[in-house]
Image: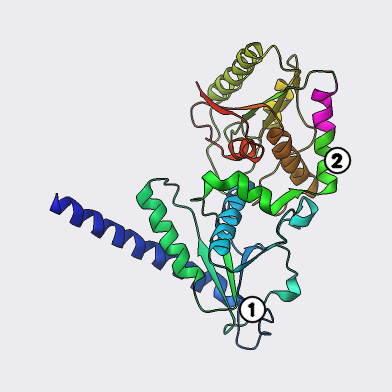
Amino acid sequence: MANKLIYSVKFAVNRLFLREYRYNRIERHYLRQYYSDTAPSATNKRKVVVFMADGKRRQGGLVDRLFGITTMYKYSKEHGIDFRIYWNVPFDLGLFLVPNRYDWRISGQDISYNNRSSRACFLDAMHDSSDKAVRLQKRITDKFLSRKYMQIHVYSNMDYEREMFGILFNELFKPSDFIQKEVQTVINKFRNNGNSMYISISTRFMELLGDFSEPKRYTVASVSEQERLINGCIEQIKIIRDRHPEASGILVTSDSIRFLDIAQKLERCYVIPGNISHVDVTCSGLETHVKTFVDFFAIAHADVSYLLVSGKMHHSNFSRMAACIYKHPFIEVTF
């Protein structure tokens, strides 16, 4: 027992040290170059934590970034620190999301890059929900965010507060008028016929079908495996559809246009028009991100959400977290 305890302590210390070393190295090699002694000092009177999405570091997809935002926001709330979001790459977040019960906006002119008043930090997720890992992540977050600077600029996708995601998201955000109008158009397709129920079914192929670009390259599946995945997902949609005869329709979302073109031909299935791109692909057009946000909120308004997974398909958090926004059942189907 004693040896097991000693090993556990050593493991935790080593893990903490290595992650801190890595985070400091990323800050030193990739972020510190943007700060100087001659840059204007911070003018805010209270310490502020600023979630940064300005293109200097990759931070994952939309939900990865929202994980980072909600986690850093909760830390700031608990420690009496102001919280802001500076997200201007690959789009201005305010085009899609606006403040709800907390005003998180900050202008670029209010961001200070003075070494004495501001400090950048990088904190990425461990993708480990064990109690030990969560305690470690909280300890690291506190060490970096408690530094004595007026502005802490955080690049993060930390996700240890995911159980609070829906509550924190709704405190921070509501859809912009433009996105709300687009989402309402989708909702009306399902709700206007006297039947108030619809379901969503999502897939995340990444690059398996060869028609989606990830920031990091993934293997394209063989032709036979592509056919197996597509046919398998179509069959699962039919099974789920038959399980819900009370539903007026099925919203199908995916990162594959090829798959969506097939799925939308199925009875009672609807696909939101538009192209698709990853939020970390900065060269993508603005209209592709519109679809991402409309998909997200349309899933959030569904009554039940499903995620289909087979082979090397991704266990995506996109529909899982969308279901948390207005608290409806989420079911992952593995086949």
User: How far apart are the alpha carbons under marks 2 and 1?
Assistant: 38 Å
Q: For the point 57% across and 39% down, which residue is it?
A: 317
Answer above or below: position of 258 versus 161: above
Q: What's the mark number on residue 181?
A: 2
Q: For the point 81% across and 24% down, which residue is it?
A: 191
Q: Taken as a whole, is the magenta stretch helix, strand or loop? A: helix
Relative to the observer, which residue lies in front, 5 or 203? 5
Earlier sequence position, callout 2 versus callout 1: 1
Q: For the point 57% across and 85% down, which residue is it?
A: 116
Q: What element carries label 1?
A: loop
**Residue type marked 2:** Lys
**Residue 272 at what x, y percent from top left?**
78, 31
Horizontally, residue 44 falls left or right of residue 25, namely right
Q: What's the mark number on residue 26?
A: none
Residue 198 picture quarter? top right
Q: Viewer-nearest of labels 2 and 1?
A: 2
Answer above or below: position of 236 versus 95: above
Q: Which colour scheme is used?
A: rainbow
Res. 172 visible in picture:
yes
**Residue 83 at what x, y percent from top left?**
63, 65
Horizontally, residue 2 falls left or right of residue 213, namely left
Q: Is residue 14 shown in magenta?
A: no
Residue 271 picture quarter? top right
**Residue type marked 1:** Tyr
Relative to the observer, which residue lies in front, 317 or 282? 317
Res. 284 visible in picture:
no
**Residue 263 at what x, y percent from top left?**
70, 21
Give the residues drawn in magenta, as a range: 185-192
Instruction: Give the residue at mark 1.
Output: 113
Answer above or below: position of 106 versus 271: below
